[in-house]
């Protein structure tokens, strides 16, 4: 079964669309990354402090969100630099 995100990204390769990326887009992604970094560190520390493998695992999951946000920011920069194909390609990478 193909995920909706993968299918949507693949369709944007076949029928290109240029996303509207603004400074607000960047600010939201940077804020999201910051919140996820703080959350991941806190969860990891508390998880180790109380011996909770669930909390430590969730910290790792939150860390994966940081990587996704980083990829989105790279996509924003690429699209703003004229490499619009990067938007669906990064979407496919994230979908996997």
Image (cartoon, helix red, strand yellow):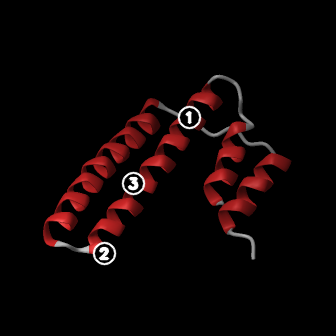
- The residue sitting at 25% across, 59% down in the picture is 44
Q: Secondary structure at mark 3?
A: helix
| Among the two numbered marks 1 and 3 on one chain, the one whose residue lies closer to the N terminus | 3
Earlier residue among tags 2 and 1 = 2
Looking at the image, residue 37 sits to the left or right of residue 14; the answer is left
- Decide which of 67, 86 is in the foreground and name it: 67
* Tag 3 residue: 63
Cα–Cα gap, marks 2 and 1: 31 Å
Query: Residue 86 at x, y = what percent?
Result: 69, 38
Task: Tell me which corner region of the image, top left, top right, bottom left or bottom right, holds residue 94.
Answer: bottom right
Q: The residue tagged with tag 1: helix, strand or loop?
A: helix
Residue located beneath label 1 in the image: 74
Which of 48/32 is in front?
Answer: 48
Nearer the viewer's eye, disc 1 or disc 3?
3
- Answer above or below: position of 87 versus 55: above
Per the image, the residue denoted by label 2 is 54
Residue 47 appears left or right of 28: left
């Amino acid at each position: 079964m193909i995920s909706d995100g993968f299918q949507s990204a693949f369709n944007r390769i076949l029928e290109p669309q240029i996303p509207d990326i603004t400074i607000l887009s960047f600010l939201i992604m940077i804020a999201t990354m910051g919140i996820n970094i703080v959350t991941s560190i806190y969860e990891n520390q508390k998880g180790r402090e109380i011996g909770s493998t669930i909390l430590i695992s969730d910290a790792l999951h939150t860390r994966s969100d940081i990587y996704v946000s980083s990829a989105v920011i790279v996509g924003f920069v690429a699209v703003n630099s004229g490499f619009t194909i990067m938007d669906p390609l990064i979407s496919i990478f994230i979908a996997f």
